[in-house]
Amino acid sequence: MTQIVGIAGSLRHASFNLGLLRAAAEMMPDGTRLEVKSIAGIPLLNTDEEAQSGTPPAVDDLKRAIAAADGVILATPEYNNGIPGVFKNAIDWASRPATDIPRVFGGKPFAVIGASPGAFGTLLAQDAWLPVLRMLGVDLWSGERLVVSRAGQNFDDDGNLVDTEVRDRLQAYLAKFVVHVRSHTRER
Ligand SMILES: Cc1cc2nc3c(=O)[nH]c(=O)nc-3n(C[C@H](O)[C@H](O)[C@H](O)COP(=O)(O)O)c2cc1C
């Protein structure tokens, strides 16, 4: 079984990006499972508190999930043309302590997708992840892009992805990412 973890970078109940991952979980290729992880419960990173109390349980859980996965999908919202602070905070926490970065992130296939109500569908936020993911040493898959614009028209009020054209694009994207993840896993 190929295990993929999808991390939704929003705390909203009806988040488009969480909805994108919920839809993805229903359409994974055979022999593949997508576990959707939330960033809820991850506190603001303060390295003074880290020095006193260590890594919070929600961060340990996220790190465990990433480390155990064959591949990771970040579903990123876009705030002010960049990465939302809450999402960057969660991944910054997951990079602590820095000595764990190679074990948790090193060489791991990563993909970045996103949905927003605007015309550019998180294009800039997705690109803003590039230096972060390079720093963490992941294997960034850039074989395709999935940008979902005009999200208000493609999701219902509960954040469920209802547009068939976007669902088809998502399914095709996932199939290709999983091929990459499997070839990567075989090589190891
Ligand atoms: C502070 C803030 C800044 C935003 N900036 C952008 C932006 O630059 N580009 C964009 O497409 N949407 C922007 N939005 C709208 C978000 O895309 C929208 O709130 C979206 O629903 C967030 O993703 P989610 O549904 O997964 O929570 C912004 C929203 C907030 C709250």
Image: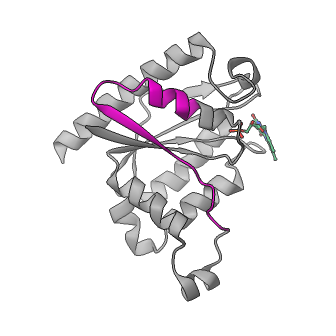
Numbered range of the magenta stretch? 20-43
Q: Residue at x 18, y 40 (%)?
A: 186
Which residue extends farthest top?
Answer: 165
Total number of numbered discs in the rendering? 0
Residue 67 in picture, x, y percent from top left = 36, 57
Ligand 1 - quadrant of the structure image: top right
**12 or 75, which lies in front?**
12
Report which quarter residue 151 is drawn in: top right
Report which quarter residue 27 is drawn in: top left
Report which quarter residue 115 is drawn in: top right
Query: Which quarter of the rendered picture does the N terminus lie within?
Result: top left
Left or right: 148 as drawn, with respect to 118: left
Residue 98 in picture, x, y percent from top left = 45, 72
- Whether residue 98 is visible to the viewer of this picture, yes or no, is yes
Tell me: residue 45, above or below residue 32: below
**104 or 41, which lies in front?**
41
Residue 32 in picture, x, y percent from top left = 32, 32
Left or right: 135 as drawn, with respect to 162: left
Q: Is residue 28 on the magenta stretch? A: yes
Residue 117 in picture, x, y percent from top left = 76, 28
Q: Residue at x 37, y 25 (%)?
A: 176
What colour scheme does the image use? Answer: one colour
Left or right: 188 as drawn, with respect to 106: left
- Whether residue 105 is visible to the viewer of this picture, yes or no, is no
Tell me: residue 94, above or below residue 169: below
Q: Is residue 27 on the magenta stretch? A: yes
Q: Which residue is drawn at 18% across and 48% down?
A: 188
Which residue extends farthest bottom?
Answer: 52
Q: Which residue is drawn at 48% across and 58% down?
A: 62
